[in-house]
Image (cartoon, rainbow, N blue to C red):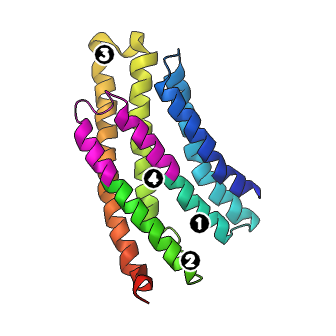
Amino acid sequence: MNLPNVLTISRVPLMFIIVALMFVDLPWAATAAFWLFIVAALTDWLDGKIARQRGEVSSFGRFMDAVIDKVMVIGLMIALVTNKGNFMGHGITAMVLLLCILCREFAISGLRMAVAVKGEVVVADTGGKVKTFVQLNAIGWLIGARMLELDYPELFGGDDRGFVTTVRIIGMSLYALSAVLTVTSGIAYFRRHGRVLFN
């Protein structure tokens, strides 16, 4: 359990805390959720950087990084979709996109296990990394809009509510884009490694 792997695993408890803060009715809970999410997202970048610098890159680290990214992203997306108001009346569309993302992630997890049986590791490619980056950005914008709306009504309420709406629309757009990238990157993974399922 070196430092990069500790940072990777830390995203799981952080995700639980963030989700809890998204549902409790406490002052500044939305702000705390937003900044804890930023910390969690930064660990996604920091663990890999430290591992490469220290020469501590491992199969366990590569595998768990990909799995925990999925756990955190899906957990937060479920919280966003089930928490009313985050998608401005487009909750059904958001849920359908989330189901597409879930189907892809379960399929790729199954592929990873099948490949692991053959003694190989499916590492994240550029498409997978871009997908994760867009997903994290979508979550950040949506949690950020919620923070501005709930914790800063004196700044962004009334006539200035348009700014919060703009932030939320950016988050929704990135959310939709992330769903498209999730599906297309999943197809790319199966094109490269799907042969394992038939050997």
Please tell me whether residue 86 is drawn above or below residue 15 in the rendered image.
Answer: above
Instruction: Give SS at disc 4.
Output: helix
Q: Which residue is denoted by mark 2 in the rendering?
A: 116
Residue at 77% x, 58% y: name it.
Answer: 2
Q: Residues within 10 Å of mark 4 (few under 14, many from 20)?
A: some
- Identity of the amino acid at label 4? Phe
For this view, does 98 lie left or right of residue 92? right
Q: For residue 160, which numbered disc appears in the image? A: 3
User: In the image, residue 111 lies at what x, y percent?
Assistant: 45, 73
Q: Which residue is denoted by mark 1 in the rendering?
A: 63
What whole-number distance in Å separates the C-alpha atoms at marks 3 and 2? Answer: 53 Å
- Identity of the amino acid at label 2? Ala
Tell which tag, 3 or 1, sits nearer the viewer.
1
Pick whichever of labels 4 and 1 is earlier in the sequence.
1
User: In the image, residue 8 lies at what x, y percent?
Assistant: 64, 53
Please tell me whether residue 180 is drawn above or below residue 19 in the rendered image.
Answer: below
- Identity of the amino acid at label 3? Asp
Number of marks = 4
What whole-number distance in Å separates the C-alpha atoms at marks 3 and 1? Answer: 45 Å
What whole-number distance in Å separates the C-alpha atoms at marks 1 and 2? Answer: 10 Å
**Image quarter for residue 130?**
bottom left
